[in-house]
Image (tube, helix red, strand yellow):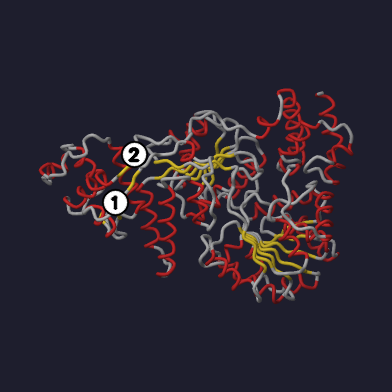
Amino acid sequence: MLHSDSPPSPQLDKARAKMAEVFGYHDFRPGQGEIIESVLQGRDVLAVMPTGRGKSMCYQLPALMRGGLTVVISPLIALMRDQVSALQTAGVNAAALTSADEADDREAAWRALDEGSLRLLYMAPERMAVPGLAERLGRAGLTMIAVDEAHCVSQWGHDFRPDYLRISDFARAAGRPQIAAFTATADAAARRDISARLFEQPPAEFVSSFDRPNLHLAVGARRQGNSQVIDFVKARPDRAGIIYCASRKACDDMAEKLRAEDVYALSYHAGLDSETRSFRQDEFVKGDGVVMCATIAFGMGVDKPDVRYVVHAALPKSMEAYYQEIGRAGRDGDPADTLMLWSLGDAALRRRQINDSDSDDDRKRMEMRRLSALIAYCEAPQCRRQTLLGYFGDEISPCGHCDLCDDPPQLIDGAVLAQKAMSAIARTGQRFGLEHLISVLRGLKTDKVMARGHDALPTFGVGEDLSKEQWMSVFRQLFASGAIDQPIDGHGEWIITAKGKDILFAKQGIRLRPPEEQRGVRSSRARPSDAADQLLSEADRTIYIALRKKRLELAKESGKPAYTIFADRTLIEMAAEKPQTPEALSRIFGVGARKLERYGSEFLSVIKSEI
């Protein structure tokens, strides 16, 4: 059980009892108690909490306790639909106003609003532009606006959305209700910007640790083809996963290759019609073991707790984007894997995209700094999690749960390797890409080398003892360290920076990881144990499998995602504890009063039939 870090409080005791009654959760997760208490006190709140730490409970529970109406501003229809479905299953009167609503659902939402029985109303930010809506909600008893994905408010955030700028004016028109804003990713600059744009007075600010200890972190150099990703997925059969690809075509190709390996894989991107996208998202959310090959458009609105891995088949946009995207794995707290594959070509493309964008110079400089931090993370010489969390201001000891802790590299004096690499850059006039530079270093008499007379250079052949892949490793590390760079307006050539010149002329040293053919990224290791593997005996697993079968059957009948009926953790606890009565079942994690009434007898029957 997760233990609360909240102080003793009669108000929190009542909130805890309400949470147990409605949701079946008997204690707060770390960080929730203080936030919920501030919200219940009527204070404006800005909370930065990692994905999977329970942000939604911080506004859903106060909405139930004090009555009135809470409006939730959320960026994607799918996210709203899933959250409303989960709330309704728990017996909460919740609704959404979206462009995808059926007429009957829309009428029911307005009717509940007018009757005063609606507790939570989810809306997209675009809906705030509807004339008169703010005033109508104010008259209906609006007490709080909860802002999900609040980083979208900030121009310094990695996913700025202009429609979010309407929130402050909307709140003013609705009678100035309380505002509670939540995000998983906001550095100090973004938090200042969010506060200035959303709140009339400084809010109570809560910044939780960014650590997600259940996620295993790994990064590797991408080789040609999709074999690394395919091996990774095949080592995790029947597990739900997300693979982020760089383009629509890459999504389709990846899904096709996985299906050829008997993996149920789908692609998702903006090139598909809305009906296909909706169907595939439902397949992923409601099904078991579906793999989604997607562009970054997929995921923000998917509230699926049992995603067991996230793979980046190409470099993400930034550290913030990477952190948010890997956060879609393991939201149920069980072990999950992450893998990022990258190349120097990815970095060059991203730099060009930043330079060619319509952003102002300040924004471009900010994006370049974020990209540099991401490249440094990719080539980190020590604990991956220390580097990631250090970017967000967290300090931790080596985590023991990343690729660099699994197989710690022994750093070497890299001065001679660096000098050889940069000598090749310098002696060829800082006008060539890696293929040519490595050919010179390895002493290969290619047509291009011979045509330019580079076989006569003193550098020709000085690196013949290393393979192409090993030299690629050296160049990646030099780039990550800031010793070499590529001109943004260039054509793929490499140049030596001021720091690189100091290393080249022995004014400064450099330590590198030994250049390797391929660094292992656990892609072919045995599939990770899930909570059921770890906690249940073989006999109890039989009960657990039967309970999952019953859950899937009920989910298909109701058209709801399986996890909205009961989470995996709930089924694991049922299988281990084997409750025989409704009272005993009510003490299981995640079994609230409404779910006990609706589903209790069916799950008790399964347990009795299996023991």
Contact (Cβ within 8 Å) of mark 2 with mark 1: no
Position of the C terminus by quadrant:
top right
Measuring from the top left, give residue 184's x and y in whole percent.
60, 56
- Numbered mark located on residue 514 in the image: 2
175 sits to left or right of 325 = right
The residue mark sitting in front, 2 or 1, is: 1
> What residue is drawn where x is 24% and y is 42%?
438
**Callout 1: SS:** loop
- Density class for disc 2 (Cα within 10 Å; few <14, some 14-19, many ≥20) is some
Question: Residue at coordinates 17% horizontally, 54% vertically from top-left?
Answer: 429
Residue in the picture at 72% in, 46% down:
2
Residue identifier under label 1? 509
Q: Around disc 1, counting alpha carbons within 10 Å, would you say few (fewer than 14), some (14 to 19), or many (20 or more)?
A: some
Q: Position of residue 288 (x, y in %)?
A: 65, 35
Asked which quadrant contains residue 362, the reply is bottom left
Amino acid type of disc 2?
A: Pro
Question: Taking 267 as reference, is 91 above or below it?
Answer: below
110 or 62: nearer the viewer: 62
User: For this rendering, which residue is in front, 276 or 383?
Assistant: 383
Three-letter code for the amino acid on which mark 1 is drawn: Gly
Q: Quadrant of residue 609?
A: top right
